[in-house]
Structures are given as C-alpha cells and as structure tokens.
Image: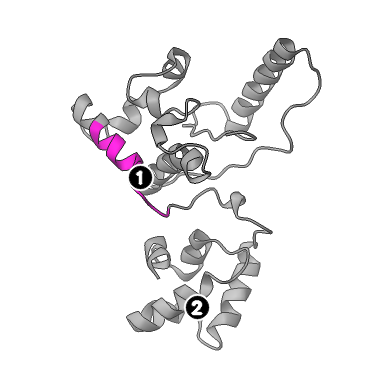
Amino acid sequence: MSNHVHLLIREGDEDVSVTLKRIGISFVSCYNLRYGTCGHLFQDRFHSENVETEPYLFTVVRYIHQNPLKAGMVEKVAEWRWSSYLAYNGIGDKTARDLLDPDFILEKFSENRKLARERFREFNETVNEDQCLEYEIKGSKLTDEEAREAIKILLNGIEIAQVKSLSRNKRKEIFKKTKGIKGLSQRQTARILGVSRKLISKA
C-alpha cells in the first residue's frame, strides 16, 4: 500500500520477528542507497496476528489482495501492480513470482493448476465484508479484558456463557448491538462469546 505493506508469512525454523527484522534492514538499506537518504524508514514495530485455521487463511489472502480495491486506489483487484495477485496467476513482475510460494494456496482450490487459478480469481474478486488484522481498527482497540467488561454491560444481567443458549432472534439482537461498541472487533466479540465470527458479521 502507499504507507504500509501486508505480508502473509509461513514461519519456519526462524522466529518471524527475526525474519521481518532482516527484511526491514535489507529493504531500508536498498531504499536509502537508491534515493540518497539515510535513517529509519518504517514507523513503530510491525503488527502481526496468527493465522490458525484454513478459513481464516483464505480471509487473509483475500483481505490483502482487496485492500487497494477497498481503499479506492484501483477499480479491480488485478490493477494493483504491487500485489501478489498477478503472481498467483503466473503473470506480472518476475521478482514477485520468485518470492511467492503459490502452491500452498492454489492447491487448496484444486490440484489442477488451471482450475485452481480460476477458482482463486473468482474467490479474490468476490464482494465481501472480510475483516482481519485487528490492529487496523480505527481508534483505540479494546483489550480482551476491556471488551469483556463492555459486553457484560451490554448484556445487562445476562451471563456471557448464556448467550449461546438464547433464542436466535435474541442472539442476533445482541450481536448487532456489539457492533456499536467502539474499539471492539467482530473477531474479538466472537472469541469472547464463543460463537462463529460469521454469526456476528451477518447480524
């Protein structure tokens, strides 16, 4: 993006913080040499979160590729030249293709490469309300403890553990109200209430 970058990294033997430190040092050195500048380039420490399930892996992949689209920087996902989207489709910048491991994602769509790419394109171009990378929530993000307290106040006497056993309409009403809590993400809400994030999103 214009002021930040998203990376989906599969951690190996080296800790991800060490990997990102090496990437950062190398990139800044090249940047400073090329443009005749010096000093720091990136502000603050990187933000990260674990990708622990396959459905969320797909969400993150699409979130990254659609970020320029949702930011109004392009009209189509494929128009953003700095994305790995083109490389997944076997086109675009050779350096990007060399840095990418497309098999890990594409094989989850199909063992047939042509069909996998067709499904990949369709998935990444589908209109959605995906949310991830909680640090990007505007304003101050609530800690889990603060979020739990805010939800307790909203429930007005109903125990958090009881929410799952409420009627469908009552639960939907509660889920909808939680969206109005400033600094509370849908993923956080789902985790605290012990329900699917999809239920929160649809409310």
Please tell me whether residue 189 is drawn above or below residue 128 in the rendered image: below
Residue 181 in the image: state x and y as whole percent.
59, 71
Identify the residue at horizontal 48%, vertical 63% (top origin): 191
The image shows residue 192, relative to residue 61, as above or below, that is: below
Query: Which structural element holds mark 1?
Result: helix
Q: Which mark is residue 160?
A: 2
Classify 10 as above or below 143: above
Horizontal relation, residue 26 to residue 95: left or right: right
Residue 28 drawn in magenta? no
Q: Quadrant of the C terminus?
A: bottom left
Q: What is the three-letter code of the residue carrying label 2?
A: Ile
What kind of residue is marked 1? Glu
Cα gap from disc 2 to disc 1, whole angstroms = 27 Å
Q: Nearer the viewer, residue 125 or 151?
A: 125
Q: Position of residue 137 (x, y in %)?
A: 60, 55
Q: Secondary structure at mark 2?
A: helix
- Write down the residue under mark 1: 54
Residue 125: say if magenta: yes
User: Percent position (x, y) of residue 20?
Assistant: 62, 28
